[in-house]
């Protein structure tokens, strides 16, 4: 009858509209007014609120820490780049270096360039384009070891990589194949994958027509090279280069060895190749010339 008098209908609605009290996790009590107090409706409301609370909790929690092993499934590769004979390039060594690394990363987007020397493995590795762009000619030599002391227009030398691809997969990838063909280079694995190789000497009276693989096999078979008690014989390599002295040069076979074992390899080569009459491959008598610090072994180009 009056403005504040409740009707029977209003009272009935009031009875059907109780407050449902829900307390969120870590929050305060909240009253939700509903018109349907059936069990199904209440279950849906409570379930929805719990899901929302769970989402709020997950979004406010810090992300879980994920430990990634950088060496697995990657592998370290020490590679040797060699330019074909007679090729002339207008690109500097630094430009070739950057171009080649960009190409390698096209084949493997996660490829990382590592410091070449094993003793500098704690140095910063090159893993992105910004780092590569900042490299100058001086810093480049932390990651690239050139064949010659003054090598300004060639990428002949050694690199140390970490890649998810095998050497065969990397070299045979289309981007790398195209770069090698366009710039006239070939790639091979270094004899030692554990550490860098260093130049230690040259074989005098050797010549460019001598088969290096035959000579290398003969040296390894020598009794002095692998004593019975040596389970880890040293690794060495032979390559052709110019020996320069008094502004004159001649082609010789140069010897490189693992850096940590160069003293041992020098001693062996001095003993085997001392110019005394011995059974050398193809009847060639040679003498080992030790390269001292400051010796120039190639022209500057």
Image (tube, helix red, strand yellow):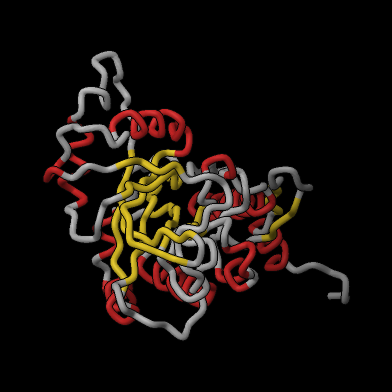
How many labels were placed on the picture?
Answer: 0
- Left/right placement of residue 177 relative to residue 120 reads left
When asked about the image quadrant of residue 59, the answer is: bottom right
Residue at image coords 60%, 73%: 133
Residue at the bottom extreme of this rendering: 90
Which residue is situated farthest in the left direction here?
282
- Towards the viewer: 195 or 7: 195
Residue 93, image x, y percentages: 50, 73
Give 130 or 35, whichever is nearer the viewer.
Answer: 130
Task: Mark yes or no: residue 45 visible.
Answer: no
Q: Quadrant of residue 264?
A: top left
Residue 8 to residue 115: above or below: below
Dividing the picture into quadrants, the one containing residue 15 is: bottom right
Task: Using the rendered image of the protein, determine whether residue 275 is visible from the camera's viewpoint.
Answer: yes
Up the image or down, 84 lies above or below 221; here it is below
Along the line of sight, which residue is nearer the eye, 299 or 54?
Answer: 299
Quarter of the figure with the N terminus:
bottom right
Q: Position of residue 272 (x, y in %)?
A: 28, 31
Q: Is residue 296 left or right of residue 87?
A: right
Q: Residue at x 41, y 45 (%)?
A: 201
Q: Is 248 rendered above or below residue 66? A: below
Give whichever of 174, 36 is nearer the camera.
174
Name the residue located 34 percent from the left edge and 79 percent from the top edge. Answer: 183
Taking the image as shown, residue 220 lies to the left or right of residue 38, namely left
**Residue 30 percent across, percent down from the top left:** 75, 53
Pinpoint residue 259: horizontal percent, then vertical percent: 47, 38
């Amino acid at each position: 009858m009056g403005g504040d008098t409740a009707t029977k209908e209003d009272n009935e609605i009031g009875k059907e509209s109780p407050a449902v009290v829900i307390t969120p996790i870590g929050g305060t009590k909240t009253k939700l007014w509903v018109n349907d107090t059936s069990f199904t409706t209440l279950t849906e409301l409570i379930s929805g609120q719990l899901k929302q609370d769970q989402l709020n909790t997950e979004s406010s929690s810090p992300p879980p820490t994920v430990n990634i092993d950088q060496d697995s499934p990657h592998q370290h590769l020490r590679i040797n780049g060699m330019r074909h004979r007679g090729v002339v390039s207008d690109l500097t060594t630094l430009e070739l270096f950057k171009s080649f690394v960009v190409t390698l990363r096209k084949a493997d987007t996660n490829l990382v360039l590592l410091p070449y020397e094993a003793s500098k493995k704690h140095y910063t590795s090159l893993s992105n384009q910004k780092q590569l762009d900042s490299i100058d000619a001086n810093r480049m030599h932390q990651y690239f070891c050139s064949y010659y002391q003054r090598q300004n227009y060639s990428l002949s030398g050694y690199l140390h990589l970490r890649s998810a691809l095998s050497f065969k997969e990397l070299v045979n990838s289309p981007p790398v194949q195209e770069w090698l063909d366009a710039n006239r280079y070939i790639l091979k694995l270094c004899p030692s994958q554990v550490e860098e190789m260093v130049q230690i000497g040259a074989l005098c009276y050797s010549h460019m027509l001598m088969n290096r693989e035959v000579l290398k096999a003969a040296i390894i078979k020598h009794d002095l090279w692998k004593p019975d008690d040596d389970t880890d014989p040293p690794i060495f390599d032979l390559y052709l280069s110019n020996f320069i002295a008094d502004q004159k040069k001649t082609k010789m076979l140069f010897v490189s060895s693992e850096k940590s074992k160069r003293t041992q390899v020098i001693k062996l080569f001095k003993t085997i190749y001392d110019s005394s009459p011995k059974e050398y491959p193809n009847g060639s008598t040679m003498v080992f010339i030790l390269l001292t610090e400051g010796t120039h072994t190639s022209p500057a180009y």
